[in-house]
């Protein structure tokens, strides 16, 4: 897409490989030969079946996994340098919330760790809760919220630290379809407002097509980048687009890019 080609490249991945030891001490390649550029402000999905290495790739970008081969550079720096500058926001599959802290106090937690003043972190938490539509639930506790609302808190907390990159590991996979669709719309609205770079892991083709600028298809044994598909649906995205012929054509195109395994 021409607009993306004009953007600044933020993440450069070159010849990336990750190898693990299995229980017998044998080498198992989780990723091999991955080359990818991700532009600033882009919404990228890493899509593939279980075991293809998509979460390993995300963790390597986040400095949660050391590469065995190749390099990752983010704005010219290593993932460790970016992590130490607290420029990552991470949203996991399950919201990791502390039951004894209120919703607002959960959002404030990373800001406390960053030694921000009580006034600043309170103001920022209020802003984030309003952004995700939970302003009226600030004094509730996590066990008083639905799963979708808990994930909203998780997203608010991730954006609260003003990250340069938002890394999301199958954040909606445990939710029902109605809740998932609403959170898709909410995430895209927040993404437009903040203009952050998003790297999103999923095994759901329709989800990837609806959300993404580009879809990076990973195939297993060993994990490799088998295709990159541009998603040329107009923005802002609407749920009605899922009923369009072009949406279904893109789903069919992405499905055809898989090598081995099934989604």
Image: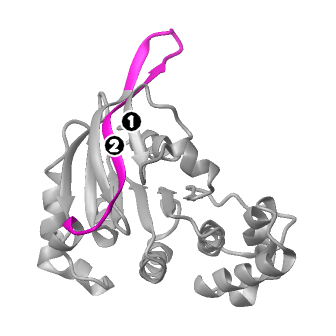
Q: Is residue 14 magenta?
A: yes
Please say if the residues under marks 2 and 1 sit with CB atoms less than 8 Å apart: yes
Instruction: Using the rendered view, name the quadrant where residue 56 is placed.
Output: top left
Position of 205 with respect to 247 (left or right) is: right
For the point 28% across and 47% down, which residue is it?
Answer: 36
Label 2 crowd bin: few (<14), some (14–19), many (20+), radius 10 Å? some
Assign a secondary structure to mark 1. strand
Q: Where is mark 2, residue-wise?
A: 13
- Depth check: give the residue in front, 71 or 122: 71
Q: Where is mark 1, residue-wise?
A: 71
Chief SS of the magenta region:
strand
Position of 205 with respect to 139 (left or right) is: left
- Depth check: give the residue in front, 198 or 54: 198
Assign a secondary structure to mark 2. strand
Q: Does the magenta stretch include residue 211?
A: no
Q: Which of the two labelled residues, at mark 2 and mark 1, occupies the earlier sequence position? A: 2
For the point 50% across and 62% down, which residue is it?
Answer: 166
- Depth check: give the residue in front, 174 or 131: 131
Above-or-below relation of 26 to 119:
above
Q: What is the quadrant of the N terminus in the image?
A: bottom left
Q: Where is residue 156 in the image (x, y as percent from the top left)?
A: 63, 73
Above-or-below relation of 83 to 133:
above
Q: Using the image, tell me which numbered label, if any, was put on residue 146.
A: none
Q: Position of residue 43 (x, y in %)?
A: 36, 66
Q: Give the range drawn in magenta.
A: 5-29
- Depth check: give the residue in front, 204 or 129: 129
Q: Position of residue 51 (x, y in %)?
A: 39, 36
For the point 32% across and 47% down, which residue is it?
Answer: 48
């Amino acid at each position: 897409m021409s607009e993306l080609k004009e953007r600044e490249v933020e993440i450069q991945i070159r010849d990336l490989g990750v190898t693990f030891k299995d229980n017998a001490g044998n080498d198992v390649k989780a990723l091999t030969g991955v080359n990818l550029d991700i532009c600033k402000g882009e919404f990228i999905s890493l899509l593939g079946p279980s075991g293809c290495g998509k979460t390993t790739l995300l963790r390597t970008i986040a400095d949660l996994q050391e590469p065995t081969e190749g390099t990752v550079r983010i704005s010219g720096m290593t993932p460790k340098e970016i992590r130490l500058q607290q420029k990552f926001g991470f949203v996991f599959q399950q919201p990791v919330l502390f039951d004894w802290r209120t919703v607002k106090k959960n959002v404030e937690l990373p800001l406390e760790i960053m030694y921000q003043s009580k006034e600043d972190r309170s103001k920022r938490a209020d802003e984030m809760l309003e952004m995700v539509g939970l302003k009226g639930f600030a004094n509730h506790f996590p066990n008083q919220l639905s799963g979708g609302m808990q994930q909203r808190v998780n997203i608010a907390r991730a954006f609260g630290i003003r990250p340069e990159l938002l890394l999301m590991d199958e954040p909606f996979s445990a939710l029902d379809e109605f809740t998932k669709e609403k959170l898709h719309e909410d995430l895209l609205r927040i993404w437009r407002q903040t203009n952050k770079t998003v790297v999103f892991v999923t095994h759901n083709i329709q989800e990837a097509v609806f959300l993404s600028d580009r879809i990076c298809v990973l195939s297993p044994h060993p994990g490799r980048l088998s295709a990159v598909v541009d998603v040329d649906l107009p923005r802002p995205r609407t749920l009605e687009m899922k009923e369009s012929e072009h949406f279904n054509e893109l789903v069919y195109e992405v499905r055809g890019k898989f090598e081995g395994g099934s989604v």
